[in-house]
Image (cartoon, helix red, strand yellow):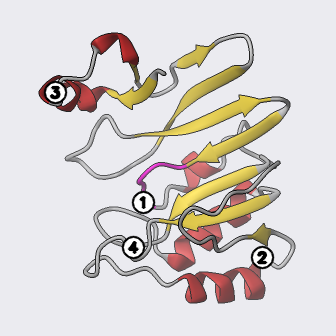
Amino acid sequence: TQMLLALDCAEEVQKLGIDEKRAAYLKENEILENDSITVKAMPCDHGKDTPFAIGLLIEADGKRIYITGDTCFREDYFSNPQLKNCDVMIMPINGAFGNLNETQGAKAAGIVSPKICIPCHYWNFAEHGGDPQLFRCEMDEKYADITYMLMRPGEEIWL
């Protein structure tokens, strides 16, 4: 099994003793493909201390999944035509350490217009917060045409 990692993970991979052959490092706009899957490293903005942070656009079996990565709100990033109408969009809504908050997450979903939007990264740390109920209210009030899912840990979705 190969791991896809941002460039700044190399030191941690080495420290943990993970076989380097298992690590594939991606930087912004790089593409990794094989016969059945394409992964493109998308830009994200997690602050000046994380210049190698990336999001991922995964394409497989005719489906596109966009994982924003840890990022703040950047309309220019979310307006990328490659992302428009993707099947699934997953983004943080904890509003801390350079991440989207609930309102910004809903606004990003409104720009990308995915078939399904899944917020994440809330309640990971007590001090970071994130309120899925507030996200739900934003989506219902402003982006009612976009389906969203509030998922439990371990819950799966099949496309």
Mark 4 is surrounded, within 10 Å at the Cα level, by few (under 14), some (14 to 19) or many (20 or more) other residues, namely many
Q: Is residue 99 left or right of residue 131?
A: left
Mark 2 is surrounded, within 10 Å at the Cα level, by few (under 14), some (14 to 19) or many (20 or more) other residues, namely some
Front one among 52 and 77: 52
Instruction: Give the labeled residue for mark 4.
Output: 95
Looking at marks 1 and 2 on the same chain, the residue that comes earlier in the sequence is marked by 1
Q: Position of residue 132 (x, y in %)?
A: 56, 82
Q: CA distance from mark 1 to mark 3?
A: 25 Å
Q: Bounds of the magenta span?
A: 68-72
The kind of residue tagged 1 is Cys
Front one among 104 and 147: 147
Instruction: Give the labeled residue for mark 2.
Output: 143
Q: Quadrant of residue 104?
A: bottom right
Looking at marks 1 and 3 on the same chain, the residue that comes earlier in the sequence is marked by 3
Q: Position of residue 149 (x, y in %)?
A: 71, 71
Q: CA distance from mark 2 to mark 4?
A: 19 Å
Instruction: Give the labeled residue for mark 1.
Output: 72
Q: Nearer the viewer, mark 4 or mark 3?
A: 3
